[in-house]
Image: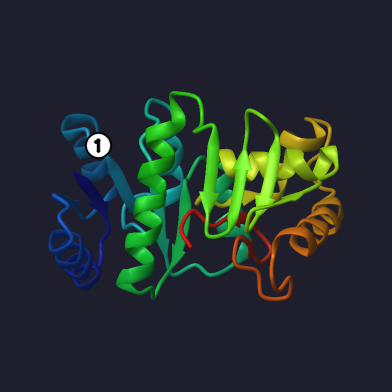
Amino acid sequence: MVLIIEDEPGIRRFLRVTLANNGYRVTEAAAAEEGLDAAATQRPDLVLLDLGLPDRDGVEVLRELRGWSAIPIVILSARDNERAKVDSLDSGADDYLTKPFSSAELLARLRAALRHAANRDGPPEPVFSVGDLRVDLVRRLVSVAGSEVHLTPIEYNLLATLVKHAGKVLTHRQLLHAVWGPDYGYEAHYLRVYMAQLRRKLEADPADPRYLRTEIGVGYRLAAES
């Protein structure tokens, strides 16, 4: 079941119809407190959360939900600025969709968030593959179209971090903490250098990447579907 916390009736209607037509059960809330009550009592599988709610800011709702639940949360917002995206993702959101968005993009992000949540409590799949890219996390082997690709330790750790969260946007800070350690959080130029190196090794066209996607000003995402 998907819980929609959104105050605009037109958006709720679009979401309800789109999700129902694709086999999802839906419940709705038009305000923050109503949504928090629904999340606690109905235990949905995923929350679609608007940031511009009438009674409370959506980031506050996100943080409150994260205080007691690991449920996947996808933000829906007209706020297109980088700060809102980074705050939401650093506060525990699994993804962030800027309005307006297509039904195809919504459904793809929702599937990715649910897959990530299904793997959250256990070890990641030992072998990840999307398109021609294959990453064996046990043997630490990476290949593209059947040919092994040699990565430096940092390149591999960066790719493995993205693999473990495939389909999810990871902020610059989250990636820096995971790969370089907790003393790093603002050295985004490190990421730009190593992502450029990874793309040269993994992408057919590094200027138009298929796998290693940039969320401008926010972070990076490894595509979970080709």
Q: Is residue 196 left or right of residue 133?
A: right
Q: Secondary structure at mark 1?
A: helix
Residue 218 as seen in the image, left or right of residue 224:
right
Q: In this view of the protein, which residue sits in the foreground, 61 or 93?
A: 93
What percent of the width, then of the height, locates residue 211? 60, 61
Residue 112 sits above or below residue 196 on the image: above
Question: Where does residue 13 sit, x and y in percent of width and height?
Answer: 16, 68
User: Quadrant of the rendered structure where residue 50 is?
Assistant: bottom left
Is residue 51 in view from this perspective? no
Category of crowding for the residue at label 1, using alpha-carbon neighbours closer than 10 angstroms: few (below 14), some (14–19), many (at least 20): many
- Residue sitting at x 56%, y 58%: 84
Residue displayed at 38% across by 25% down: 68
User: Farthest residue toward the front?
Assistant: 146
Q: Which residue is mark 1?
A: 39
Residue situated in front as seen by the camera: 40 or 135? 135
Left or right: 19 as drawn, with respect to 130: left
184 or 53: nearer the eye?
184
Residue at 40 percent of width and 57 percent of height: 109
Q: Is residue 80 above or below residue 36?
A: below
From this view, report whether residue 11 is shown above or below residue 59.
below
